[in-house]
Amino acid sequence: MKKQVLLGSVLLAAISAFSQSGQRPTGMINAKAIADAKYSVESAAPVATSKTVKPMVFPTRSGSKTSAVNWQNISSSMNIYGTIISYCKPLQWNDELNAVSFVHRKSPTYVISPLPASTAATGGIMALITKDCGTTWDSTAIYANDNFWGRYPSGGIYNPPSTPANTDINNAYIVAAGPTTGGGTGWIGNFYASKKLGSANYNNVPSVAAGAQQAMPTGAPFSPGVPSRHDFSCYGFTATDDGKMRVMAGITDDAVTADSAIMLMTGTFNSGTSTFDWAGRVFNPPTTIASDGSDNFVSRPVMAWNEQGTIGYVIIMGSRLGATKSNVGFQPIVYKTTNNGSTWSLENGINFNLSTYNDVKTRLWATSVGGDTVPNFLWLEGIDAAVDANNKLHIFTSLVGHSSSDPDSLNFISQWTTENYLWPHTNIETNGNPVHPFLWDFVYDGTNATPSWSHKLIDSMSTEGPGSRSTDRGYQDNPWDMDPANANQKVRLDARLQMSRTPDGQKLLYSWTESDTAFTDNQKKWNNLPNIKARLLDVATGSLSTTELDITVNAVGEIANRAMYHFVSPKFKLVSTTNSNFIVDVPMTVSNSNPYAQLTPNKHWYSCAGMTFARPSTVGISENKAVLANASLYPNPAKNNVTVKVSLVTGSKVQVEVMNTIGQVVKATSVQGLVGANTINVDLNGLSSGIYLVNIKADNATSTKKLVIE
């Protein structure tokens, strides 16, 4: 029941509506405290409990899915923890080898040899490899250590750089990284592992070559080239055509619990040992400092590179030192390299003080701090980035408004209604636009000029993620079970905003999850029935697909309304282009269990999700007077009638035309649609069995669906 946004309201109108709405924050949430805590729920080795949880039963619903997307259960892990951080990148597609890799913690039945101690076995890391987009898979063990147990793995395929590009997977390696723990001792280091691929090495024995399995403790001070002191080495794992393997981590200062800097770890293949040498590069962003001595940035770094590995960006969300007015918030602090990471430069940030960002600031709550609206790039729902064909940086994010510009309060966020939402989720503007989380693409052209940033509204969401602790917002609506051994904690849910691109950077994909509030308990705005949504950007024209796709809404089995902890490969394949469509294959995974139990085995589901996007024709959602947020048909196949479901931003006439395969209109109807969800019944009597197209139009927005009549 999603309602999308119309742009164009002036700032004063939004502020006026805000002041008259009666919607006031009910409290504050300290988002930075959540980030600093990392995921301490797994500091100790979790063990399965005997607790009985009732399986959830989900309603049947319809949506705007493009074509059949098949999901297969490819493996499982001992528990759900290895997949709950959306900033990790365990799923990767290598285009030269046409191979997909998925790095994850071992399944309960997978035995790594030699067998680690029973308590350490949960930290064994394995990889799945497919060269046919998921039809067949090979598995291989890559890491096991009795003292440093692998957690939150990321990884990808190293393909040796050559001209022409190597296409023999027997010459390639799987490479992985992640943080480590050891019993009840907390986070004690990081692991780095590699193993040669090929039929001879698809086995349950990690490589024993010197350097193939490295465990790096966090205890020693850092010095360049000796990357000891870093933690949580799992963010943004990237493999580029220059042969470099890269992953981001944090650096924790002993004096405070928060990270005080960011580490970029780069792995270089050592031909003498056939393993990887890892070196670190520190980024210490220029941020304001809170009175407790902590730096005002969030330790969830984001990284993006072009295909060649020559142009790269490191993005840290923080309050930049010296910023004024609308720029004092947690916003992108960007470093750029043009020489494969040898040197880096600090780039100019977004200038939200310019009037060109009024369309962004009109949709932030709290509306202003001392008269200035201060955007906060909200890591809680996920942030991702990609580099396009022109080497421009795209940052995909949601925003909230800061409640205070004080350095001690910058990441305290307003909470709304008795549910303590981070967005008001109500119609407070005079034109009836809904107040949802909005999804933006902020684009940096890489020139460091002024201005050098632009932005595009991608979509909006109708839900937000519930918390994980018993005192958190939305905890009671979080469907996962409680872990009684860890302060009544569940696992936290988020929209998991992610970006993907074609290897040439000409097409960008935005993906996220949200729930249809028509089916959530009491129509609450918690994202506990998630489905994966996607939009496509054509970089050459700067155009965005006019309709979003719902990838999982009609999926069978354990996926529809249960698309938990999904990952999207950072690269996807453009299969074909027609005059009206772009057809793409996008590797995706979903990880869940039924019932939702965090400590028991959880399944990993995979799809080489074939998507058909209407050729993009709008530069942003703002151009649509009425947007068909969700347009769907049911039942499908149909017999005597079909119901068309559409969601409208404003009241608008809706035209529905049923066309045969040669484009002739054989049935037509029109109704006056209302704001929100609309259902339109179409009589199919008299039509022969076969395939038809249903064209749905509201003002200048259209959506075309395939209909099968039995």
Image (tube, rainbow, N blue to C red):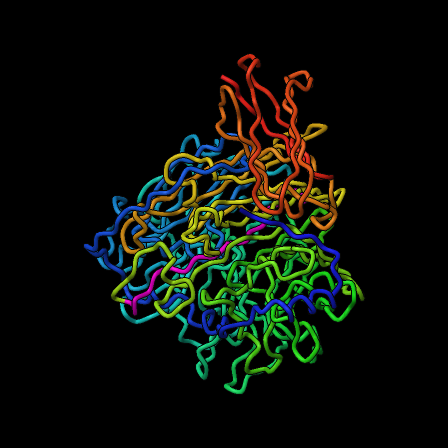
In the image: residue 562, left or right of residue 168: left
Instruction: Kindly give the residue lying farthest to the left in the view shown.
Output: 50
**Residue 8 appears in which quarter of the rendering?**
bottom right
Q: Is residue 534 magenta?
A: no
> Camera-side residue: 127 or 70?
70
Q: Which residue is pictured at 65% across the width and 62% down the height? A: 363
Q: Is residue 624 above or below residue 16?
A: above
In the image: residue 503, left or right of residue 190: right
Instruction: Kindly give the residue lying farthest to the bottom in the view shown.
Output: 291
Q: Which residue is pictured at 44% across the width and 78% down the height? A: 257
* Residue 115 at x, y percent in the picture: 24, 51
> Camera-side residue: 475 or 19?
19
* Residue 236 at x, y percent in the picture: 53, 57
Residue 200 can be seen in this image: no
> Camera-side residue: 700 or 686?
686
Q: Is residue 501 magenta?
A: yes
Q: Which residue is pictured at 64% across the width and 48% down the height? A: 649
The segment highlighted magenta reads: 486-506
Majority secondary structure of the magenta segment? loop
Instruction: Kindly give the residue lying farthest to the front in the view shown.
Output: 672
In the image: residue 633, left or right of residue 613: left
> Camera-side residue: 330 or 447?
330
In the image: residue 275, left or right of residue 572: left
